[in-house]
Each structure stands twice: as structure tokens, then as C-alpha cells.
């Protein structure tokens, strides 16, 4: 497992929180950004875990987050048959 990032891949915020560890120690960690709420597993490819490799079209700044008009709601679950 690679070293945990020091900044969020999406918004470059340095407030990264550890959310969960793999059942097998050292395999992966789940991390979340405290600003943009992006969440990722450390075992994912660099394009999801490394700021320098994260796609430019999906990067955010603090200004982008502050100017967001709405956070989309999670739709209700579909009824089960």
C-alpha cells in the first residue's frame, strides 16, 4: 500500500480524515476530504488518489465549492419487490 496522501486529490485541502481500514491490515484505507467530501480507497489508481494525476476537469477549488448552488440530494431507494 502506498503512503497516504497529504492533500485531497480533488480539491487539494489538507484536512484528510481516515474513515475505515481493510479487514486485512495494511491492504487499503478509506479516506475522506473534510472540505469537498471526496472519498477514496488508497488502493485505487493514481488518477483517483494523487492530486497531480487527478483529471483537471474534475478538480475543484475552495471557490468552486463555496459557489456551488446545490449539493444534489440522494434519491430515495427504489421499493423492493
Image (cartoon, rainbow, N blue to C red):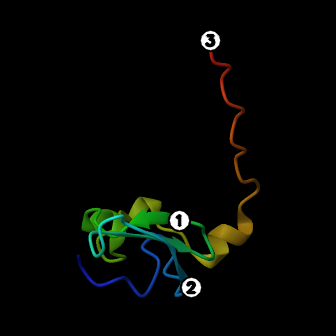
Q: Earlier in the sequence, mark 2 or mark 3?
A: 2
Give the number of the mark in front: 1 or 3.
3
Q: What is the secondary structure assignment of the residue under circle 1?
A: loop
Q: Relative to 50, is 8 on the left or the right?
A: right
Q: Position of residue 17 (x, y in %)?
A: 54, 79
Cβ–Cβ under 8 Å for marks 1 and 2: no
Cβ–Cβ under 8 Å for marks 2 and 3: no
Q: Residue at x 30, y 64 (%)?
A: 47
Q: Relative to 10, is 66 on the left or the right?
A: right
Dividing the image into 4 quarters, which one contains the C terminus? top right
Mark carried by residue 38: 1
Q: Find the distance from the CA under tag 2 to the CA under tag 3.
A: 42 Å
Q: Residue at x 33, y 75 (%)?
A: 50
Q: Residue at x 63, y 69 (%)?
A: 64
Q: Earlier in the sequence, mark 1 or mark 2?
A: 2
Q: Earlier in the sequence, mark 1 or mark 3?
A: 1
Q: Nearer the viewer, residue 24 or 39?
A: 24
Judging by the rendered image, the residue that carries numbered circle 3 is: 81
Judging by the rendered image, the residue that carries numbered circle 2 is: 15
Q: What is the secondary structure assignment of the residue under circle 2?
A: loop
Dividing the image into 4 quarters, which one contains the N terminus? bottom left
The crowding category of the residue bearing disc 1, from other C-alpha atoms within 10 Å (few below 14, some 14 to 19, many at least 20), is some
Q: Relative to 68, is 12 on the left or the right?
A: left
Q: Nearer the viewer, residue 3 or 26?
A: 26
Above or below 8: residue 14: below
Quarter of image, res 36: bottom right
Quarter of image, res 33: bottom right
Q: Position of residue 31 (x, y in %)?
A: 47, 72
Amino acid at each position: 500500500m502506498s503512503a497516504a496522501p497529504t492533500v485531497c486529490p480533488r480539491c487539494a485541502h489538507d484536512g484528510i480524515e481516515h474513515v475505515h481500514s481493510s479487514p486485512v491490515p495494511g491492504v487499503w484505507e478509506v479516506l475522506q476530504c473534510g472540505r469537498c467530501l471526496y472519498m477514496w480507497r488508497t488502493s485505487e489508481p493514481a488518477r483517483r488518489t494523487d492530486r497531480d494525476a487527478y483529471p483537471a476537469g474534475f478538480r475543484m477549488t475552495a471557490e468552486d465549492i463555496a459557489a456551488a448552488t446545490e449539493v444534489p440530494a440522494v434519491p430515495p431507494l427504489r421499493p423492493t419487490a
